[in-house]
Image (cartoon, rainbow, N blue to C red):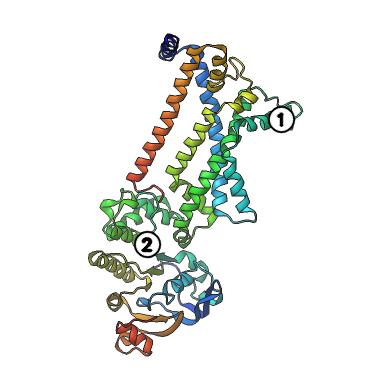
Amino acid sequence: MSPFPPILPLAVDGLGFAAGGRPLLADIDFALEAGPATFILGPNGAGKSLLLRLCHGLLAPTAGTVRWTGAGAAHAALRQAMVFQRPVMLRRSVIANVEYALSLRKLPRRQRAELAQDVLQRTGLWPLAGAPARVLSGGEQQRLALARAWATRPQVLFLDEPTSSLDPAATRAIEDIIRAIETSGTKIVMTSHDLGQARRLAGEVLFLHRGRLLEQASASAFFAMPQTTEARAFLAGELLW
Amino acid sequence: MSDMSAAFSAALSLILGVDAGLAEIVLLSLRVSLTALVIAAGLGLPLGAALALFRFPGRGAVIVVVNSMMGLPPVVVGLVVYLILSRSGPLGVLGLLFSPAAMIFAQVVLIVPIVTALTRQTIEDLWREYHEQLRSLGVRPAGAIGTLLWDGRFSLITALLAGFGRASAEVGAVMIVGGNIDHVTRVMTTTIALEVSKGDLPLALGLGIVLMLLSIAINAGATLLRRVAARHGEALA
């Protein structure tokens, strides 16, 4: 658990985002609470990654607001992390990638080394600690991206399709790590186009379609009884556009 | 033909015997160009990084100017630096004209654009790849400069080698502002020009060989660096 006051809940009100005059997201209202993992589902182009970036603060909304409303909201930027679809590896060793993230949190050097060793052991990367990060395999790089994010003990971790280019074994390793991070007290918010993965990991689902939020429901309710025809078609594997 | 081979063997004996006159000239050349390189790195690396990271009005024009200054004709640089340092020029009071300092000044002017332009390109490519991740980690553009310079180190060292190569091989600018004064401002390139016109081929050839070796060493170094970078997966895409 994070020793800092919580930044959650996240309040998203009337959120919209347009690029080049084209509306990509519109009228999105929801709240994210502490608790089980929230999955943002929807067909390609629905705006899932965009919504994740807006929540994380990488993009500024063109309409509406994204606000952290917990007691620790003032330091929200330092208490959250994101892992991208294609992991961005710094041109340094595996352990230096983790320690870099920790150095930005102004942790003393010794504590950095301890925390880095801890997450690398938990993610199975400790034997590779001294290797250059960019020669790792795709699955190992994504594990390192997760380790780097985890090391900073985020209260909220955003994951953008973290397993989309990985084989089943690597995907499994990533899912195990995500579960472990969740168990350590971090709120997981993630996009995926893998429905099996959503069934395995999601506690709550936000269903996006064409830039609009059509459903927010517990995962069990969403998968058992989707409320909209779009969600029913999506779950049935029909082609949506 | 026998003149040529005689000159060549005389040149080799100058090099192998570490002739005092030749060594003096080589050392002055290295001192001038290495000092110019250090100063140019101090100016060009942060300047190039800033140009890559910050958006401001006229940025595009600045980049075009810096890029085109990479090919500045050395004699023109020599002329301009001469005018600046001459008695009636803005820096005339310093009395630097016809000194090694003047030559360093001219070489800095020559290679700052090279270092700046190559740094700008390297850092901009890296930033494109890194910026979401770094911003996610809480790094602001100004705070990213150190990270990007370090992560671009292989490409940047290559840029510095390119700058050093240009500085040490250039003749026009140092000839004008240095004056090619024996024992004071005579460097490899200017000595070669002078000795050839005087007909003293061994010294000219000897210096020419040293210059060539230097150039080969620089390029070998750059190639080696690229290999190391590739092995670490750290070359820029």
Circle 1 residues within 10 Å: few <14, some 14–19, many ≥20? some
- The amino acid on which the numbered mark 2 sits, given as a three-letter code, is Arg
In the rendered view of the protein, which quadrant contains the C terminus of chain A? bottom left
Q: Nearer the viewer, residue A67 or B157?
A: B157
Q: Residue at x 39, y 75 (%)?
A: A44
Say whether residue B179 is visible.
yes
Q: Which residue is mark 1?
A: B83
Q: Nearer the viewer, residue A146 or A35?
A: A146
In the rendered view of the protein, which quadrant contains the N terminus of chain A? bottom left
Which of the 4 image quarters holds residue A45?
Answer: bottom left
- Gap between marks 2 and 1, in whole Å? 54 Å
- The amino acid on which the numbered mark 1 sits, given as a three-letter code, is Leu
Q: In this view, which residue lies farthest toward the front?
A: B1
Which of the 4 image quarters holds residue A142?
Answer: bottom left
Q: Residue at x 32, y 44 (%)?
A: B231
Chain designation of label 1: B
Q: Secondary structure at mark 2?
A: loop
**B227 displayed left or right of A28:** left
Say whether residue B146 is visible.
no
Rendered view: A2 above or below A10: above
Q: Are marks 2 and 1 in contact (CB under 8 Å)?
A: no
Q: Position of residue B70 (x, y in %)?
A: 56, 40
Q: Nearer the viewer, residue A61 or B75?
A: B75
| Count of marks overlaid on the render | 2
Chain designation of label 2: A
Q: Position of residue B50 (x, y in %)?
A: 57, 50
Circle 2 residues within 10 Å: few <14, some 14–19, many ≥20? some
Query: Mark 2 vs mark 1: same chain?
Result: no
**A118 displayed left or right of B194:** left
Q: Which residue is mark 2?
A: A86
Q: Residue at x 42, y 56 (%)?
A: A102
